[in-house]
Amino acid sequence: MGKMALMMVESIIGIQMSGSFQVVDFIVNLLYWFFDSEERYIRLDFDSPGIKMDDASPEAMAKMKAVAEKFIEDNQNLLDRIVALLQGDQTVK
């Protein structure tokens, strides 16, 4: 119980100042920790290309494509791990 209390104390200020996605991330992370499955919680974050959500211009799509390609390149091992987990590989940590 001490580890969980410490996690909550360390995170409480950040949660109060953060957006809802960070609160959800914290809660889900805590649940996975509680059920001893921390290695199975994987959050994918990437840098925003700085475009508006409703911008479907060719320039905006090119920026999004570049961000996606860089994310895939930088995170290939993590993406391979996700695929293995989804395929039922129980040996993946």
Image (cartoon, helix red, strand yellow):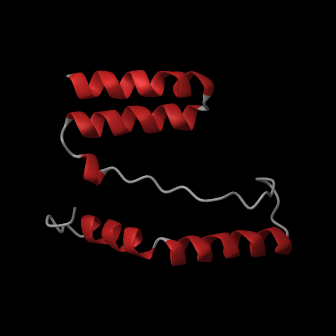
Q: Where is residue 63 in the image (x, y as percent from the top left)?
A: 76, 71
Q: Residue at x 46, y 28 (%)?
A: 11
Q: Position of residue 40 (x, y in %)?
A: 28, 53
Q: Is residue 74 above or below residue 55?
A: below
Nearer-the-camera pick, 2 or 78: 2
Q: In this view, does 1 lie above or below 59?
A: above
Q: Position of residue 72 (x, y in %)?
A: 52, 74
Q: In this view, does 64 lie above or below 73?
A: above
Q: Residue at x 26, y 71 (%)?
A: 84
Instruction: Assign the N terminus to one quadrant of the image.
Output: top left
Q: In this view, does 63 lie to the left or right of 83?
A: right
Q: Where is residue 55 in the image (x, y as percent from the top left)?
A: 82, 59
The extreme left residue here reads 91
Q: Is residue 31 left or right of residue 1?
A: right
Q: Residue at x 80, y 65 (%)?
A: 56
Instruction: Assign the C terminus to one quadrant of the image.
Output: bottom left
Splitting the image into 4 quarters, where does residue 77 fall?
bottom left
Q: In this view, does 22 lie to the left or right of 49?
A: left
Q: Which residue is drawn at 32% across and 33% down?
A: 30
Splitting the image into 4 quarters, where does residue 80 fall?
bottom left
Q: In this view, does 34 lie to the left or right of 27?
A: left
Q: In this view, does 14 lie above or below 74?
A: above
Splitting the image into 4 quarters, where does residue 83 fall?
bottom left
